Amino acid sequence: MSSIKHTVDPACAGVPLAELLKTRVARFDRITPDWDAFADSQVEGRRRAQYRFIGAGGSGKPDPNAIPAGGFTLSIMRLPPGQGGSSHTHEVEEAFFVLDGELTVFFEDGKGERVSTKLGRWEAISCPAGILHGFENEGTTDVYMQTFIGSGRPGPVGYADDAIYAEEQQRLASRRGAG
């Protein structure tokens, strides 16, 4: 006989297993890439698409096709050649896992000093809370990367660029107001 060893999440308690399974699966072919997920997504050199699988990701953008977030978010980013993500922080850890292509990732201090490394397929980096970091596709083919954020409802992306950060705060506030 089997037994449950941990407390069931209250949001799942009493939900029939078949119904629970329907709400806990996200399929890539049913997710629309969002090319306007972030405040810097329309800036040349920072264009990228977000595919949200679990939660809203760092964008805070609700997605009815995503699995509800608990303690983390999971998304996939598609970065065309020459594109990337601006230097930013989160209030929690963020991790990148390269699925395909080669990605340059960097850490940066408040003075603009930067160290970087290249990650290939199936390589990962963990970006600690409060540490400026970002990424770039310096190659000639699209990069696909998984992004994990250690909160089910992350706050605004802490862009180092004050103008982009102000736009990010406005976008997040309007999304929360609409939701």
Image (cartoon, rainbow, N blue to C red):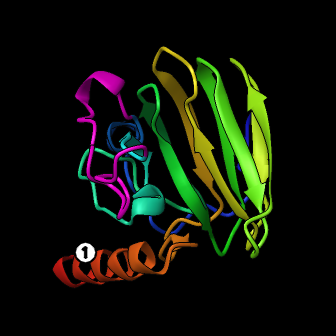
| Residue ranking furthest to the left | 178
Is residue 35 on the magenta stretch?
Answer: yes
Point 39% across, 48% down: residue: 67
* As drawn, 174 above or below 141: below
In this view of the protein, which residue sits in the foreground, 113 or 134? 113
Q: Quarter of the image holding residue 132?
A: bottom right
- Please name the amino acid that badge 1 sits on: Arg
Residue at left 41%, top 27%? Answer: 80
Q: Position of residue 139 (x, y in %)?
A: 56, 20
Which quadrant does the C terminus fall into?
Answer: bottom left
Q: Residues within 10 Å of mark 1 (few under 14, many from 20)?
A: some
Specify whether residue 27 is in view: yes
Where is residue 125 shown, x and y percent of the image?
Answer: 77, 42
What residue span does the magenta drawing correspond to?
Answer: 26-45
| Observer-nearest of 20 and 61 | 61
Which quarter shows the N terminus?
top right
Dividing the picture into quadrants, the one containing residue 87 is bottom right
Across and down, in percent, residue 105 comes to 70, 42
Check residue 131 for magenta coloring: no
Q: Which residue is mark 1?
A: 175
